[in-house]
Image (tube, rainbow, N blue to C red):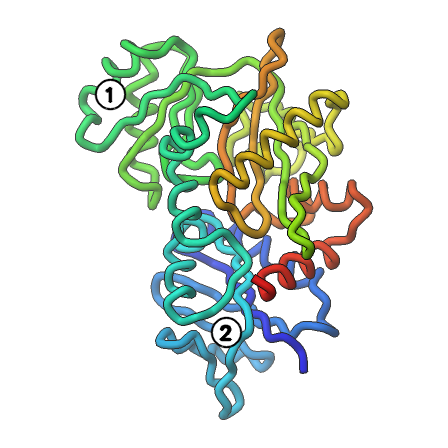
Amino acid sequence: MKTKIALITGGYTGEAEVSFKSSAFVYSQLDHDKYDIYQITITQDAWFYVSDSGIKCPINKEDFTLLLNDSILKFDLAFIMVHGSPGEDGRLQSYFDLVGMPYTSCDALTSALTMNKGYTKAILADIEHINLAKSVLLFDTQRAEGVSLVEEKLSLPYFVKPNAGGSSIGMTKVKVAEELQAAIDKAFDAENTGSQVIIEEFVHGREFSEGIYRNIDGELIVLPATEVKTTREFFDFEAKYIPGLTEEITPADLNEEQQSRIAKILKEIYVRLNCKGMVRIDFFLENDTDKFYFIEINTIPGQTPQSFIPQQVRATGMTEQEFYGTLIEVALKR
């Protein structure tokens, strides 16, 4: 009998449109001879599956079962492909823990923690060879005094972004002091991104993104790095999802010592944050100093054909079908 997989897509934020693209690609790459795959859409209004005949069938949220063709379908595993809330902030993981459903991503605590950029940096601060840009974390009660707090501790230019958002939504690069208040307001007002804003000093360097996961034998595997070169001011939402605005080089041009050093750092981050499944970590290599600077971690990284992780998987000689199959088998074994 085939393993029944609930491929979860959608979500409650503007990142839902990316989730639909990611889940469609994962669906196309999974081994349908081995798995029965059901795409389950989650919105704030409803959780449902659309049958082959076009009928919208609701999920029973009491136990995450599906009434289909007059019989109750129980899933063996949830493959979470929801970017943003509730798939990336721990809420969905908490639900699946309650109903006893295994899933492919990090657990609820790690997911919630890593959605908070400021708290994540605090936990990673003492890892050897890692560097963190100087930053200020603002809470909603500090909105009015934010400019003075930032100018007191940081030097221009700044990156201003929601502390709990993704896809660079609500993010601004500030080069002159007069732009700071508007950037803070934009970050605070970004939809469904929490009530905190983080401001970081700009790091001048090359930008990279690299995936890491644990294989069926429990070994941590670091995928080849991707270097990001964009024609935009920074790697914003448009640069990420509009073709032609960004050059992505996989594998990146890093020497053997740099590859070894960053692999060690990434493994320590994965273990320190108690990650599970696949994650993607973004970082800078600072100009002139050869220091690696942590940017952020993504626990539900994008899986469109052009996304970093599929690029990196292909660069190893592995197929996406093999890779996604490994994630499923590891989660089932866990």
- Mark identifier at residue 49: 2
Q: Residue at x 61, y 19 (%)?
A: 285
Question: In this view of the protein, which residue sits in the foreground, 304 or 297?
Answer: 297
Q: Quadrant of residue 134?
A: top left
Q: Position of residue 101 (x, y in %)?
A: 47, 69
State the quadrant of the C terminus: bottom right
In this figure, which residue is indicated by the disc labeled 1?
146
Q: Quadrant of residue 171?
A: top left
Q: Residue at x 69, y 61 (%)?
A: 325
- Mark identifier at residue 212: none
Q: Position of residue 294 (x, y in %)?
A: 52, 26
Structural crowding at the residue carrying mark 2, measured as other residues with C-alpha within 10 Å and reported as few (<14), some (14–19) or many (≥20): many
Q: Secondary structure at mark 1?
A: helix
In the picture, measured across the screen, residue 182 lies left or right of residue 212, that is left
Residue positioned most to the bottom:
70
Q: Amino acid at mark 2?
A: Tyr
Q: Position of residue 75 (x, y in %)?
A: 53, 75
Q: Residue at x 62, y 59 (%)?
A: 330
Q: Amino acid at mark 1?
A: Gly
Residue 266, can we see it? yes
Q: Is residue 158 above or below residue 44?
A: above
